[in-house]
């Protein structure tokens, strides 16, 4: 009889522990969902507020880079990719970790900011420049780079704009590829000094999709004639995978 009572007590205790664990798991799941929603809501609010400050080329009364730099002197450019919601200022920090968890306003944010690698010249004068952004759902930050992995989208959306305080460039999409985070051609510390023809040849040989005409223009150019920019983000394929878009920079007013 005492053993039966002991077993009943143990059973009640076990049921209580299970109930507590289930409640705790439910609370944690609820908090995680709420926290995730807050991250995206914050990223969306920041993006919406920044769009009102987007410089407009040729508009005397439009916003200027001076207004953006009054908010953050690290702002060096603005990038827009047609057909996507990628429409953000680009910053450059003291190192490539500064803006991983900090937004353009200087506030802590898991969404971070779109930033130019410190390997690259802030005026995009290098033959090869490298820009990073977090991969986020709901078309936030560089999440829409995934769209280029669909061939129909890649074929139909081929352009963008890169504005700096001193110049405006049309971005002509060359190719999209998936690489590892240790890919030396894309991410090497010497990448800013690379000949863009070498980078383009590498992209052409590894691309998921490629615009042959743009790749051929770069391949046929003389050293220093062309400039390209790579846009990189995490990939959903694996923790080490990165989605990369390569675009040719064409100064406005010049023939493409």
Image: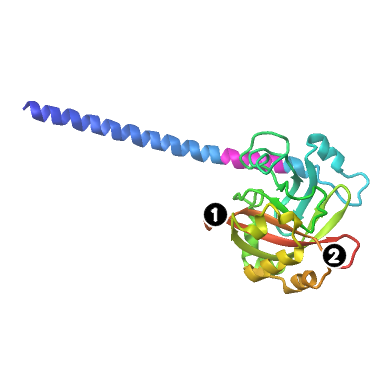
**Residue indicated by mark 2:** 225
State which tag comes first along the sequence, 1 or 2: 2
Residue 115 coordinates in the image, percent (x, y): 71, 46
Range of residues picked out in magenta: 37-47
What residue is rendered at 76% in x and 63% in y? 196
**Residue 102 included in the magenta stretch of the image:** no
Of badges 1 and 2, the one in the foreground is 2
Is 91 drawn above or below residue 213 in the view shown? above
Q: Judge by depth and name the residue closer to the eye, 239 or 12.
A: 239
Q: Who's the residue at 64% across and 34% down the image?
A: 108
Q: Please, is residue 174 above or below residue 71 in the view?
A: below
Residue at disc 1, secondary structure: loop
Looking at the picture, the colour scheme in use is rainbow
Q: Which mark is residue 192?
A: none
Q: Residues within 10 Å of mark 1 (few under 14, many from 20)?
A: few
In screen coordinates, is 173 left or right of 167? Answer: left
Question: Does the segment drawn in magenta span residue 38?
Answer: yes
Q: In which quadrant of the rendered view does residue 222 lie?
A: bottom right
**Image quarter for residue 191?**
bottom right
Mark 2 is surrounded, within 10 Å at the Cα level, by few (under 14), some (14 to 19) or many (20 or more) other residues, namely: few
Q: Considering the image in quadrants, where does the N terminus appear?
A: top left
Quadrant in the picture for the C terminus? bottom right
Relative to 252, residue 62 above or below: above
- Cα–Cα gap, marks 1 and 2: 33 Å
Q: Residue at x 53, y 58 (%)?
A: 237
Under tag 2, what secondary structure? loop
Looking at the image, the residue that sits furthest to the top is 2
Q: Which residue has dot 1 on it?
A: 240
- Name the side, left or right, on which 82 lies relative to 184: right
* Front residue (pair 151, 120): 120
Residue ranking furthest to the right: 60
Q: Position of residue 188 (x, y in %)?
A: 66, 54
């Amino acid at each position: 009889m005492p053993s039966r009572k002991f077993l009943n007590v143990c059973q009640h205790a076990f049921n209580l522990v299970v109930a507590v664990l289930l409640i705790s798991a439910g609370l944690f799941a609820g908090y995680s969902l709420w926290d995730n929603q807050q991250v995206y809501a914050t990223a969306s609010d920041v993006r919406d507020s920044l769009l009102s400050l987007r410089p407009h080329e040729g508009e005397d009364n439009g916003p200027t880079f001076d207004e953006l730099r009054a908010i953050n002197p690290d702002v060096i450019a603005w990038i827009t990719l047609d057909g996507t919601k990628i429409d953000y200022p680009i910053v450059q920090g003291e190192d490539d970790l500064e803006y991983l968890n900090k937004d353009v306003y200087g506030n802590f944010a898991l969404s971070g900011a779109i930033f130019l690698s410190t390997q690259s010249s802030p005026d995009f004068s290098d033959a090869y420049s490298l820009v990073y952004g977090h991969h986020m759902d709901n078309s936030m930050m560089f999440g829409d780079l995934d769209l280029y992995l669909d061939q129909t989208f890649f074929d139909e959306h081929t352009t963008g704009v890169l504005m700096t305080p001193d110049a405006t460039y049309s971005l002509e999409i060359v190719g999209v590829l998936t690489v590892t985070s240790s890919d030396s051609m894309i991410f090497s510390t010497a990448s800013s000094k690379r000949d863009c023809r070498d980078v383009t040849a590498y992209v052409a040989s590894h691309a998921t999709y490629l615009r042959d005409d743009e790749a051929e223009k770069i391949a046929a150019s003389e050293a220093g004639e062309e400039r390209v920019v790579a846009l990189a983000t995490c990939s959903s394929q694996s923790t080490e995978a990165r989605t990369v878009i390569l675009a040719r920079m064409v100064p406005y007013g010049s023939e493409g």
